[in-house]
């Protein structure tokens, strides 16, 4: 792991340890669980899929055509009136794939493509600021966080018929920094309840670029650029409780 990532990880552990100690006397911790939809840029990855489509005459989807869902949780403590600090963790996985029949010099062949994210996970030190903390109705907030993420993905391409058995495979993984900023609101279920619904929108900056080996006779070169650009807007909805 790179030095910067170790520093980020250490900062997150420190934030998680300091937040409950520095919590405002009498303040209550807050737990949030949510489902999140993201719209990552993935510019290089989507262009590589487009290049496959141009080369073989296929029409495979890219990451702009499919849902990008994940789940997450936050645990925060009151530090001062209107201010909360804590830890956020996210988890997701997913894939895009397709199978088509394409023409070749030796007749039609089946072309199959898959890009699978086996795991995406992150951990943030996150803070929230509530400008009207005494409100018993809608409670808007601003959010910011910095953290570290890990993801592992595999891309495969296969071209087969009675005379052809070709393909390629790319494996990529690593740690990288991630940052987020956004806003949202809490809607208490009732004045007497400690449960509420949370909505929010944010922008994430998170990108990992590696030069990784390619195996298989369809490989354009010995190595390719694996550019995981997860930067982009996201929206979440969740349930939360103050204790």
Image (spheres, rainbow, N blue to C red):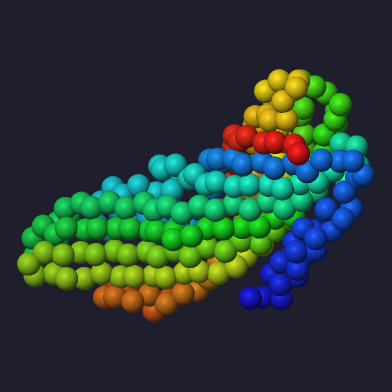
Figure check: 201 above or below 218: above
Q: Position of residue 37 (x, y in %)?
A: 53, 40
Left or right: residue 6 versus residue 173 is: right
Asked if 192 appears above or below 176 in the picture, the reply is above
Residue 56 shown left or right of residue 32 in the figure: left
Residue 4: x, y in percent?
A: 72, 71
* Residue found at x 59% / y 47%: 72
Q: Where is residue 35 in the image (x, y as percent from the top left)?
A: 55, 40
- The residue drawn where x is 86% and y is 26% is 134
Q: Which one is in front, 45 or 99?
A: 99
Residue 186, can we see it?
no
For residue 3, which quarter of the picture?
bottom right
State which quarter of the image contains the C terminus: top right
Considering depth in this image, is 199 or 80 the residue closer to the camera?
80
Give the quadrant of the N terminus. bottom right
Rendered residue at 44%/58% (across/down): 117
Whether residue 53 sits left or right of residue 82 in the image: it is left
What number of labels is visible?
0
Q: Can residue 204 be seen in this view?
A: yes
Residue shown at 76%/20% (left/top)?
191
Q: Where is residue 15 in the image (x, y as percent from the top left)?
A: 80, 58
């Amino acid at each position: 792991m790179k030095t910067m990532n170790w520093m980020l990880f250490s900062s997150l552990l420190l934030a998680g340890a300091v937040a409950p100690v520095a919590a405002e006397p009498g303040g209550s911790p807050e737990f949030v669980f949510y489902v999140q939809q993201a719209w990552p840029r993935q510019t290089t990855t989507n262009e590589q899929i487009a290049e496959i489509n141009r080369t073989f005459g296929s029409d495979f989807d890219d990451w702009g055509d499919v849902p990008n869902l994940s789940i997450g949780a936050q645990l925060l403590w009151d530090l001062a009136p209107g201010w909360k600090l804590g830890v956020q963790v996210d988890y997701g996985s997913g894939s895009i794939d397709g199978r088509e029949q394409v023409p070749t010099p030796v007749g039609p062949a089946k072309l199959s493509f898959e890009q699978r994210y086996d795991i995406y996970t992150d951990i943030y030190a996150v803070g929230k600021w509530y400008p009207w903390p005494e409100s018993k109705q809608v409670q808007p907030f601003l959010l910011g966080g910095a953290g570290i993420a890990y993801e592992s993905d595999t891309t495969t391409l296969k071209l087969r018929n009675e005379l052809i058995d070709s393909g390629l495979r790319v494996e990529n993984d690593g740690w990288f920094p991630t940052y987020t900023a956004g806003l949202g609101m809490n809607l208490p279920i009732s004045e007497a309840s400690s449960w509420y619904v949370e909505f929010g929108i944010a922008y994430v900056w998170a990108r990992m670029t590696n030069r990784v080996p390619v195996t298989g006779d369809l490989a354009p070169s010995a190595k390719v650029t694996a550019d995981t650009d997860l930067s982009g807007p996201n929206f979440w909805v969740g349930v939360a409780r103050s204790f």
